[in-house]
Image (tube, rainbow, N blue to C red):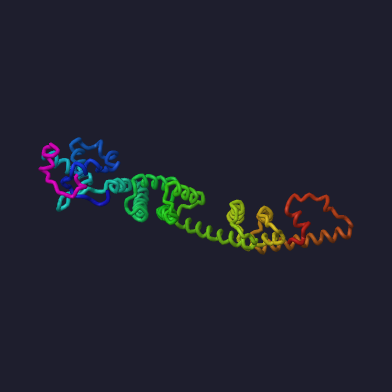
Amino acid sequence: MKGSTKIMKLEQSANSLLFSTTNIPDAFFTEYFSQASGTAIKVYLYLFFLSKYGKEIKINDLSKKLDIPLKDIQDSIKYWESLGLLIRKNSGYEFANMQEIELFKLYNPKVSQSPEQIKETAKNQYRAKAISAINNEFFQGVMSPSWYGDIDLWFSKYGFDEEVMVALFRYCFNRSALHRNYIQAVAEAWSQNNIKTYTDLDKYYEQQEALSKVKKSIAKKLGLNRQLSQYEEAYIEKWMNDFGYNMPIIEIALKKTTSKANPNFDYINKILEDWNDRNLRTPEAVNKFLLDTKQKNKDIKTIEKKTGYNNYSQRSYSNLSDLYANNPDNL
């Protein structure tokens, strides 16, 4: 219940009461119900019920209405005051936001803490601020209690910093997908990409942007007037993320397919796998390898001409070095 509400007197028709409801937060039953006396519960629930209707009620009238001694009414009100659920004002009393109280208790520092507990408390305070920011920015301050548990679970499971958690909700909100399953899927993907801090997230965004540009560039250079398939995109991600190759190196491999009517990603992948196996990390290293291989092929042909021996038919093309050796024009 956002904000607070005065203790009020009920004056409604029987018909309107028949169809009205009074919503009590679940936290009342899980955190307070078993500890309070029957009289205190009776007083709290009736006052909460009256608080919806906007008219004042005197303590004496309340005592008569509930058939509870005046002192017991006063003791019950003091009890709820001591717990922070009722707040005394000049004009009466207000109901505190029970969910905010429980969240504060969850993250509030304890007295006489060890260094480890102090560190944990500081982390919890930051988390509480992050959850409050999520509540205000994406739920207009009325986030349901179940979200609090989910967010706390995601903090523990994925080890996200507070800024990353807020960014997670913003990412999903901007895609009109503020649903638990979608948020969980995005969180899982971020975790698999080793995202913990906002710096990690920034780096991930930069990598994704670079990857997107390379995909578009490859499709354009290969003359593909269509979207890349997931299979083809997986190859490109492998070349960039696993091999660490950038567009200049990939482009050298792409030139091997310029004469092909249907560019073959498997063929490009075999070339790049070979270069990776040879630890060729720069365009200069790749070009030197290709030139050396081309010269080697020329030498082999010269020898074959002089000796009159040609073993092409006997070769098995088991690797790309054989392919390079027998296709010097492709270099």
As rendered, which of 54 and 79 lies closer to the eye?
A: 54
Q: Residue 191: percent from the left, percent from the top?
A: 48, 49
Q: Identify the image quadrant of residue 241.
A: bottom right
Residue 251 visible in image: yes
Does residue 141 belong to the magenta stretch? no
* Quadrant containing the C terminus in the rendered view: bottom right
As rendered, which of 167 and 296 lies closer to the eye?
A: 167
As rendered, which of 265 and 262 lies closer to the eye?
A: 262
Q: Left or right: 246 with respect to 112?
A: right
Above or below, 281 against 315 in this view is below
Above or below, 33 against 209 in this view is above
Does residue 65 belong to the magenta stretch? yes
Q: Identify the image quadrant of residue 293.
A: bottom right
Residue 112 visible in image: no
Q: How many marks?
A: 0
Q: Residue 306: percent from the left, percent from the top?
A: 88, 60
The magenta region covers: 50-69
Q: Left or right: 80 with respect to 127?
A: left
Q: Residue at x 39, y 45 (%)?
A: 150
